[in-house]
Each structure stands twice: as C-alpha cells, then as structure tokens.
Image (cartoon, rainbow, N blue to C red):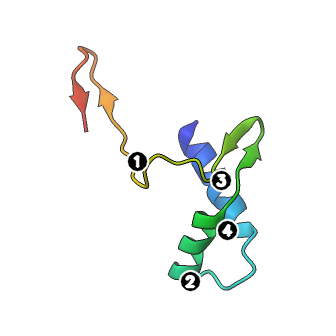
Amino acid sequence: MAGYIAARYAFEVLNRMAEAPTRQNVLAAFQRANSIDLGGFRVGGQRRSTNYVTQSMLTADGRVVG
C-alpha cells in the first residue's frame, strides 16, 4: 500500500509540473508541493521533521532488519 501511495503522490507532483522534468526542476517541484489528497490519504505538505526517511522490517522473532 505504501508503494502505491508513494507512486500516486509522485505522479501527481510530476503531472502538475509546468517546466521540463530535469533533476533540478523535479527536486524543486517536490520541495514546494502542497499536501495532496489521494483517495483519503493526505500526503505531502511542508510539515516535515526531517528530509530523510528510512524503512525497517521486523523478522518473525522481532529482530530489526535494515
């Protein structure tokens, strides 16, 4: 589900770009993107605590992987 929401958010931000999709323009578009409602999931906006996100998984016995 997280991958689907992330892909939809990326699509919406890129679809709203007026300029050519260069690396700098895409980064700028994501930085200035407002919050977007994706079927009940509100994503984005400027309320961030960090620019970095990490993902962790748990094994069946509760150990953290990644």
The answer to whether residue 26 is left or right of residue 39 is left
Q: Residue at x 59, y 64 (%)?
A: 30
- Of label 3 and label 1, which has the lower sequence position? 3
Q: Give me the disc on residue 9.
A: 3
Q: Which residue is mark 2?
A: 22
- Of label 1 and label 2, which has the lower sequence position? 2
Could you tell me which secondary element the residue under label 1 belongs to?
Answer: loop
The answer to whether residue 7 is left or right of residue 19 is left
Q: Are marks 3 and 2 in contact (CB under 8 Å)?
A: no
For the residues marked 1 and 4, what is the alpha-carbon distance in whole angstroms? 20 Å
Q: Give me the disc on residue 66.
A: none
Q: Nearer the viewer, residue 28 or 59?
A: 28
Place of residue 37 in the rendered image (x, y in percent of width and height, measured from the top left): 76, 44
Q: Nearer the viewer, residue 50 or 6?
A: 50
For the residues marked 1 and 2, what is the alpha-carbon distance in whole angstroms? 23 Å
Q: Residues within 10 Å of mark 1 (few under 14, many from 20)?
A: few
In this view, 39 is above or below 11: above
Q: Disc 3 residue type?
A: Tyr
For the residues marked 3 and 2, what is the alpha-carbon distance in whole angstroms? 18 Å
Q: Residues within 10 Å of mark 2 (few under 14, many from 20)?
A: few
Q: Disc 4 residue type?
A: Leu
Q: Which residue is mark 1?
A: 53
For the residues marked 3 and 1, what is the alpha-carbon distance in whole angstroms? 16 Å
Q: Are marks 3 and 1 in contact (CB under 8 Å)?
A: no
Could you tell me which secondary element the residue under label 2 belongs to?
Answer: loop
Q: Which residue is mark 4?
A: 14
The answer to whether residue 15 is left or right of residue 29 is right
Place of residue 35 in the rendered image (x, y in percent of width and height, measured from the top left): 70, 50
Q: Residue at x 70, y 57 (%)?
A: 34
Nearer to us: label 1 or label 4:
1
